[in-house]
Image (spheres, rainbow, N blue to C red):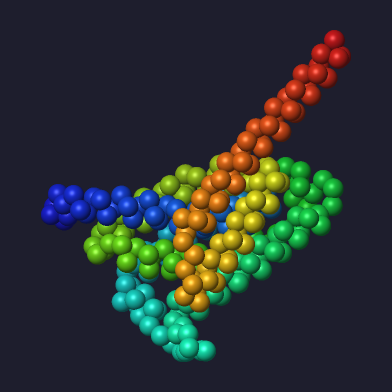
Amino acid sequence: MLALLSDPNVWAALATLTLLEIVLGIDNLVFISVLTSRLPEAKARRARAIGLSLAFVFRVILLAGLTFVIGLTATVFSFWGNDFSWRDIILIGGGLFLLAKGTHEIHTEVESQDGEDEPGVKAVAASFGLIIAQLIIIDIVFSLDSIITAIGMAEQLEVMVAAVVIAMVVMFISAGPVGRFIAEHPTTKMLALAFLLLIGVALVADGFEFHIPRGYIYFAMAFAGMVEVFNVIAVRNRRKKRERHRHMSTL
């Protein structure tokens, strides 16, 4: 252990892997935030805590069973000249699930009646148990992708565990503010749903061994997110200006 702590290569690997795990965790966090946005605030906090706890538990279990995880990359069957492993099958299934869920949520948002998207009004009676079940499914998919990436970047199990723990702490800290922001701003939620569709396409592509560089995806997400932040600030400033104008007109 002391040898690991004194090795600068280990610290470099830990920093790199931690940053990568945090970036990969964004996908998981966006899905959890979107899925819990229709719940009352108390249940939303509980659902986020359960979802993130399950994500951490699944990652630790997969790290503990590295031999099993590595075995998931072995070919199970071939079709039209393409080899498919259990990892590919899980990624394709998870990607299709994200595409279906994202499309359904977008349809619900677009077709919702006036006033349903007001903060604090929960017109859609989302089943807490169903949400947890969906969180379990997607946590498994993202955890598998995360751990296989960790195995490819680090050799020491201790480094992988430390990177996962640090990334999960960052996700726990970010979950509340991100979840509340998405729930309070309908346009931001629509943007997050578009991200889910983008992530779903990337997972399906990975399953078919067609890798879309994640840097392109996360740059697009970061740019769109920055534009949306400016949009939210502009809307807030216009609202404050109207309120000041109404206040002045009543004097």
Q: Residue 67 in the image: x percent, y percent? A: 31, 76
Residue furthest top as drawn:
251
Q: Which residue lies at the image location 50% right of the left edge and 53% below the top edge?
A: 218
> Which residue in the rendered view is the most extreme toward the left?
3
The answer to whether one can see residue 84 in this image is: yes
At x 59%, y 61%, the residue is 198
Quarter of the image for residue 195 reads bottom right
Q: Quadrant of the C terminus?
A: top right
Q: Residue at x 44, y 82 (%)?
A: 85
Residue 130, x across and y down, in percent:
64, 66
Q: Is residue 91 above or below residue 84?
A: above
Q: Which residue is at the front of the view, 208 or 112? A: 208
State the quadrant of the N terminus.
bottom left
Residue under the point 48% across and 88% down: 81
**Residue 135 seen in the current view:** no
Q: Is residue 34 left or right of residue 158?
A: right
